[in-house]
Each structure stands twice: as C-alpha cells, then as structure tokens.
Image (cartoon, helix red, strand yellow):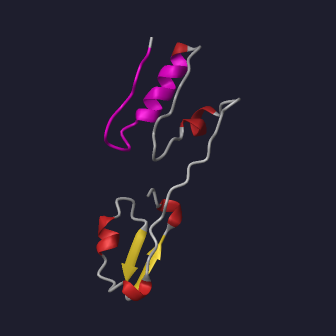
Amino acid sequence: MKIAVASGKGGTGKTTVAVNLALSIGEAQLLDCDVEAPNVHLLLHPRGVESNPVYVKAPRIIEDRCNYCGRCAEACNFNAIFAARGRIILFEELCHG
C-alpha cells in the first residue's frame, strides 16, 4: 500500500499526519519529499538515513545598482530580504532560493 499526504499550503499538518500514519502502521517507510523544509527527521530521529547536501543559491545584492525601493523584499516569499533606510539585509538562513 502507498499513501501520499500532500497539500500546496504550508503549515497544514502534513508532516504530523504522515508521521502518525507511519507510526500507526508499524513497519513503514516514510519519504519526506518537502523540497523547502523536509523535517520528518525532527520527529522520528531515524537511524541509517542517507543524506545528500543541497545547495540553494541566495540572491546577491549589488548595492551600487540598488535604489532601495524594496521590491526585492516584497517579492521574497520567505521574508529573507529586509530593505530599510538605504540598506538591504539578506537573511541567508531564511532564504529558499
């Protein structure tokens, strides 16, 4: 049997539902396919996990070409860019590309 838990909206409890389904089934394999925040491992602490690094490109702010309009901050869905008072700050830990 294969079960998929999916939704386009974040924060709906997909991970919680998937983890609880896997635990209730017993002998189950659980694949976390969340490309932005795969975090099943935080709830299950699995052994023998294979991990491959993924690199995300962060935007580069070219200050001498920037007029500090704030459009980059408005366009960023993850609030990783902050524009204020002639300054642009990039929070790379929040950046998802």
Quadrant of the rendered image containing residue 78:
bottom left
Q: Which residues are magenta?
A: 2-24
Q: Nearer the viewer, residue 40 or 2?
A: 2
Say above or below: 65 vs 1.
Answer: below
**Percent position (x, y) of residue 58?**
48, 64
Q: Nearer the viewer, residue 25 or 94?
A: 94
Taking the image as shown, residue 26 lies to the left or right of residue 77, namely right
Q: Residue at x 32, y 86 (%)?
A: 67
Q: Residue at x 44, y 16 (%)?
A: 2
Q: Residue at x 29, y 81 (%)?
A: 69
Taking the image as shown, residue 57 lies to the left or right of residue 44, namely left
Taking the image as shown, residue 32 lies to the left or right of residue 71, namely right
Q: Nearer the viewer, residue 10 or 87?
A: 87
Q: Is residue 49 inside the magenta stretch?
A: no
**Percent position (x, y) of residue 11?**
38, 43
Say above or below: 10 vs 18.
Answer: below
